[in-house]
C-alpha cells in the first residue's frame, strides 16, 4: 500500500522515558541491537541523529580509503552513527537499545531504491567492530559544510540487504533510459509497499562563475537586469550587494535549459543579445566587456564556445528531478528530449557525487569554459567552498523556498524514504520515527537555518500532503508549500504541482 497518511499522530505519541546517564557509544559498547542499512541520497542525512539518537550517546563513523591516516576519512561514500535510542525517540520501543545507522551514499538514489525493490545486496560499514575503526576526532569539509566524526573506518563489507533507502525523488520516476543505469532494471514503484514523501528538495542549476557573469552582463545590456549591476566603466562590486545580489541574478528559461541539457544546443553562440538593436553573440558580448575597459577578472571571451555540462550519472536523484521538471523525461515517454551523453557535440561530463559536481564546475571555470550543472542548493552557500559556480534563475525565479511556496520556481522534488515489509518490528518503529521527525515543518525550518544564499534562503520545504497546513502568505518559520504532487493520492514526480485541495490556500503575488 502507498503511505500518504500524515505521521503527526505518531510523532505526538512518542513517550518520554527515564534517561540513563548519557555516554557516546564506542565499538566496545557491544553489538548493535537495531541495524539500519540505508543506501541512496544524502537528502535526509541531517535528520538521522536528532530523530533517533539519545543526545550525547552518538559517535559518528566515516569511511577512509587510506586508514593509516585517520584525518583523511570522509562521508562521501559510506558513513554511520552508533548511539542509544529509546521510547523518547522511537514510539513503542521498550527500554534503551543500541542502534547502528549505516549510510551508503555511493551510487546515488537509483542504487538505493533498486536495492530496496529487488533485494540487491550492497556493501556498507557493517558494524562498529568489523569496520576496522580507529578513534579520531576529525572534521571533513565538503561543499562549504563541516562534518565532524569520531572514528575513521577502513573496511566495508558486502552482501548486506538494505533496510530502507533514500531518494532525491519518489521511486515512480526511475524508468526510461536516462533515469536508469545501463543494464539495470527500471523501478516498479508499485512493488514497494512503504513509500513516504519526506519534504521538498530545492535543486539548483549552477553555471560556472564566468558564464554567470556573461549572462549577467548580457541581461544588463538587453534591459532585463538593472544597469547598476555592472558597467565596463565602473568598478565591479563583487559583494552580495553587487553582482551576487538577487537583483543582479541572471535567468534562463526551461526551454533553453532543456535545449542545453539535451545537447540540441551545443554552442553558446546560439544565444544572441539585442545590444542597441544589433544581434550580438554571447561570446561577442563577453569580448565587448573587455574592449570597453571592463575588469577582465570579471569577464573575458571564453576559451571556446562549446556548451559544457557537468551532469550526473544515470539514476542520480537530482538529475532525475531535473529531467522530470525541466525536460518532462520520462513523463512524455518517447517524446521526451533525451539527456546529452558524453562524446557528443555538447561536452557532457559525468559527475558521480555532489563533491564531484563541485569539482567539475570549478575546473571548467578555471579553464574559462562555460558550463552548466545540477546541484542541491545546500552547496556553495555564500561561496564558502570557493566553488567556481553560481546558481541562476529559471524563468525569472531564483531557487529559494519562497519561490517554491509561490509556485514560481519549478525545480524541486519530493524526496522520500521507502522500505519493504520484511523489516523487523523495531526497525519499522525506528523508520516511522525518522519519517515523522523529518516531515515536521519545525524540523525542516531548523534544517534550513544556515542555507542563506545572497539571493535568499534555500534548502527544503515541508509538504502539505503530509498533513501540515501552509500559511496563507509566505512564512519562513513554517515553510510548507501549498502545492502538491500527490493530488491523486500518491506522489508522482511527473505531475505538475497543483494547489492542495485539502487546504485551498495560496498567496497571490
Image (spheres, rainbow, N blue to C red):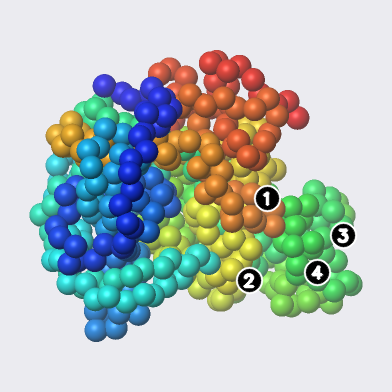
Q: Which mark is residue 302?
A: 2
Q: Residue at label 3? A: 228
Rendered residue at 55%/15% (across/down): 501
Q: Give how far across and how far down residue 326 sits, in percent.
A: 52, 40
Distance between the alpha carbons at the discs numbered 2 and 1: 29 Å
Q: Is residue 297 left or right of residue 373?
A: right
* Lower position in the chain sequence, tag 3 or tag 4: 3
Rendered residue at 82%/60% (across/down): 229
Q: Residue at label 1? A: 456
Q: Give how far across and how far down residue 23 sits, in percent.
A: 31, 61
What is the count of numbered marks?
4
**Quadrant location of the C terminus?**
top right
Is label 1 in a helix, a strand or a loop? strand
Q: Is residue 283 visible?
A: yes
* Lower position in the chain sequence, tag 3 or tag 1: 3
Q: Are marks 2 and 1 in contact (CB under 8 Å)?
A: no
- Compared to residue 12, the image places residue 427 above or below, namely below
**Quadrant location of the N terminus?**
top left
* Lower position in the chain sequence, tag 2 or tag 1: 2
Distance between the alpha carbons at the discs numbered 2 and 3: 24 Å
Is label 4 in a helix, a strand or a loop? loop
- Compared to residue 57, the image places residue 149 above or below, namely below
Query: In this rendering, which labeled residue sits more in front, label 3 or label 1?
Result: 1
Q: Residue at label 4? A: 237
Distance between the alpha carbons at the discs numbered 4 and 1: 19 Å
Q: Which mark is residue 343?
A: none
Rendered residue at 29%/44% (across/down): 86
Query: In this rendering, which labeled residue sits more in front, label 2 or label 1?
Result: 1
Query: In this rendering, which labeled residue sits more in front, label 2 or label 3?
Result: 3
Q: Give how far across and how far down residue 211 sits, in percent.
A: 64, 63
Query: In this rendering, which labeled residue sits more in front, label 4 or label 1?
Result: 1
Amino acid at each position: 500500500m502507498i503511505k500518504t497518511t500524515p505521521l503527526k499522530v505518531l510523532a505526538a505519541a512518542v513517550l518520554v522515558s527515564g534517561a540513563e546517564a548519557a555516554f557516546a557509544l564506542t565499538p566496545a559498547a557491544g553489538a548493535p541491537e537495531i541495524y539500519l542499512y540505508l543506501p541512496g541520497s544524502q537528502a535526509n542525512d541531517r535528520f538521522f541523529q536528532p530523530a533517533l539518537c539519545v543526545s550525547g550517546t552518538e559517535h559518528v563513523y566515516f569511511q577512509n580509503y587510506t586508514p593509516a591516516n585517520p584525518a583523511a576519512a570522509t562521508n562521501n561514500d559510506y558513513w554511520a552513527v552508533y548511539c542509544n535510542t529509546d521510547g523518547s525517540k522511537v514510539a513503542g520501543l521498550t527500554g534503551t537499545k543500541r542502534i547502528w545507522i549505516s549510510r551508503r551514499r555511493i551510487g546515488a538514489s537509483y542504487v538505493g531504491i533498486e536495492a530496496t525493490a529487488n533485494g540487491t545486496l550492497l556493501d556498507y560499514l557493517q558494524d562498529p567492530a568489523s569496520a576496522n575503526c580507529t578513534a579520531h576526532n576529525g572534521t571533513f569539509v565538503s561543499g562549504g559544510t563541516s562534518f565532524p566524526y569520531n572514528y575513521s573506518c577502513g573496511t566495508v563489507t558486502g552482501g548486506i540487504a538494505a533496510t530502507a533507502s533514500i531518494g532525491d525523488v519518489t521511486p515512480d520516476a526511475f524508468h526510461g533510459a536516462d533515469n536508469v543505469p545501463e543494464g539495470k532494471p527500471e523501478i516498479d514503484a508499485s512493488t514497494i509497499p512503504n513509500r513516504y514523501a519526506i519534504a521538498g528538495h530545492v535543486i539548483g542549476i549552477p553555471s560556472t562563475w564566468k558564464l554567470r557573469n556573461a549572462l549577467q552582463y548580457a541581461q544588463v545590456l538587453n534591459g532585463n537586469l538593472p544597469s547598476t549591476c555592472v558597467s565596463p566603466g565602473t568598478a565591479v562590486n563583487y559583494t552580495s550587494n553587487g553582482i551576487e545580489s538577487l537583483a543582479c541574478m541572471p535567468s534562463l528559461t526551461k526551454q533553453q535549459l532543456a535545449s542545453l541539457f539535451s545537447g540540441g544546443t551545443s554552442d553558446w553562440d546560439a544565444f544572441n543579445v539585442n545590444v542597441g538593436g544589433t544581434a550580438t553573440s554571447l561570446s561577442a558580448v563577453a569580448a565587448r566587456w573587455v574592449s570597453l575597459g571592463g575588469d577582465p577578472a570579471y569577464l573575458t571571451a571564453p576559451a571556446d564556445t562549446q556548451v559544457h555540462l557537468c551532469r550526473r550519472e544515470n539514476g542520480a536523484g537530482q538529475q532525475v528531478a531535473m529531467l522530470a521538471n525541466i525536460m518532462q523525461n520520462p513523463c512524455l515517454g518517447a517524446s521526451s528530449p533525451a539527456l546529452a551523453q558524453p562524446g557528443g557535440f555538447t561536452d557532457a561530463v559525468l559527475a558521480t557525487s555532489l563533491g564531484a559536481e563541485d569539482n567539475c564546475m570549478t575546473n571548467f571555470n578555471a579553464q574559462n569554459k562555460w558550463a552548466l550543472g545540477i546541484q542541491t542548493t545546500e552547496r556553495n552557500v555564500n561561496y564558502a567552498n570557493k566553488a567556481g559556480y553560481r546558481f541562476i534563475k529559471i524563468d525569472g525565479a531564483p531557487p529559494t523556498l519562497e519561490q517554491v511556496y509561490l509556485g514560481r520556481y519549478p525545480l524541486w522534488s519530493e524526496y522520500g524514504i521507502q522500505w519493504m515489509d520484511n523489516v523487523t518490528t523495531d526497525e519499522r518503529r525506528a523508520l516511522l520515527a525518522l519519517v515523522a521527525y523529518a516531515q515536521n515543518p519545525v524540523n525542516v525550518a531548523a534544517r534550513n537555518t544556515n542555507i542563506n544564499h545572497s539571493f535568499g534562503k534555500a534548502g527544503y520545504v515541508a509538504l502539505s500532503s503530509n498533513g501540515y497546513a501552509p500559511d496563507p502568505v509566505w512564512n519562513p518559520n513554517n515553510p510548507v508549500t501549498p502545492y502538491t504532487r500527490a493530488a491523486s493520492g500518491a506522489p508522482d514526480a511527473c505531475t505538475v504541482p497543483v494547489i492542495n485541495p485539502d487546504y485551498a490556500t495560496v498567496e497571490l503575488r
